[in-house]
Image (spheres, rainbow, N blue to C red):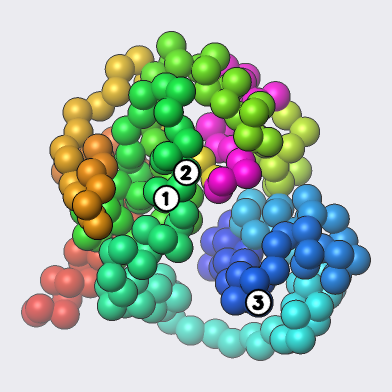
Amino acid sequence: MPPIRLAGLLGAAIREQRQSRELSQCELAELAGVSQATVARIEGGGRGPSIAMLERLLAAMDVQLVVGVEPLDAHLDARIDDLAARPIAERIDELGLDELLDRLTDFPQVITGSTAALLQGAPVPADALEIALRWQDSKPLTRWLETNYGQRWNARWGEFGGVWLEPEEPGEHRWSTRYGEIRATMCDELPETIEVRHGGRSYQVVPLVELELSEPRAAELLRHYRDRQLASDG
């Protein structure tokens, strides 16, 4: 398993345990005697924690790590099966999607990536709001981030913070904010969209067929999901 993928699984495990106990990142950090930035970095999955750090965080929540092996992609398959069995409305609430969108009113954007796939019924993992933004809206985006405690992903350190917020600066277009994480695709013009509705709310999303052409991460997840469907039907 590639190290980045393993880091993502470990980060997700810490996040799930923390959220199940209704702890904030700051509260878990205090219990474990580490910084909030450390918890955010580990949950972000950019760099894997040491075994000692992982055990320290888990012990603070009265649980422990159990190590095992499984067939390649078994974890992803199990996640897809779990998502397929859950209502889309529940997954929207879990992501905090509506609350974040309600506050992104300073500039136009459309939903793309795994978030768009989720809203169109594909049971693929989505752990952040993925949106397409125009380069011409970089300044209002930066102002919004400054107002809402934004921190940009620092690939060098594997955590949020310590780099300039502005999209024009080198680095991933990925920010943590007080309302959740945002991952942006910067473009000259917004892509064509379709409208989907859930719970009386409409969302402008990039269609699945376009996601498979323009969003590598979402395309890989969608292909994996469809391959599994074909295998089960066969």
* 162 on left or right of 136: right
Look at 70% across and 68% down and name the residue there: 23
Would you name the residue on which mark 1 appears? 97
In depth, the one of 164 and 209 nearer the eye is 164
Residue 38 position within the rendered picture, expressed as x and y whole percent measured from the top left: 78, 55
128 is within the stretch colored magenta: no
- Above or below, 29 relative to 157: below
> Mark 3: few, some, or many residues within 10 Å (few <14, many ≥20)?
few
Q: Which residues are magenta?
A: 164-180
Q: Are marks 3 and 1 in contact (CB under 8 Å)?
A: no
Residue 184 position within the rendered picture, expressed as x and y whole percent measured from the top left: 46, 34
Q: Are marks 3 and 2 in contact (CB under 8 Å)?
A: no
173 is within the stretch colored magenta: yes
Look at 28% across and 70% down and name the residue there: 87
In depth, the one of 92 and 114 nearer the eye is 92
* 211 on left or right of 194: right
**Residue that lies at the very extreme toward the front in this rendered image:** 200
Residue 94 position within the rendered picture, expressed as x and y whole percent measured from the top left: 45, 63
Which tag, 3 or 2, sits closer to the chain's start? Answer: 3
Look at 68% across and 36% down and name the residue there: 149
- Above or below, 181 relative to 67: above
Residue 191 in view? yes
Quadrant for the C terminus in the image? bottom left
Would you name the residue on which mark 3 appears? 21
Q: Which mark is residue 67?
A: none
Residue 224 position within the rendered picture, expressed as x and y whole percent measured from the top left: 28, 63
Residue 50 in view? no
Would you name the residue on which mark 2 appears? 100
Q: Quadrant of residue 21?
A: bottom right
- Above or below, 72 relative to 196: below
Q: Are marks 1 and 2 in contact (CB under 8 Å)?
A: yes
Q: CA distance from mark 1 to mark 2?
A: 5 Å
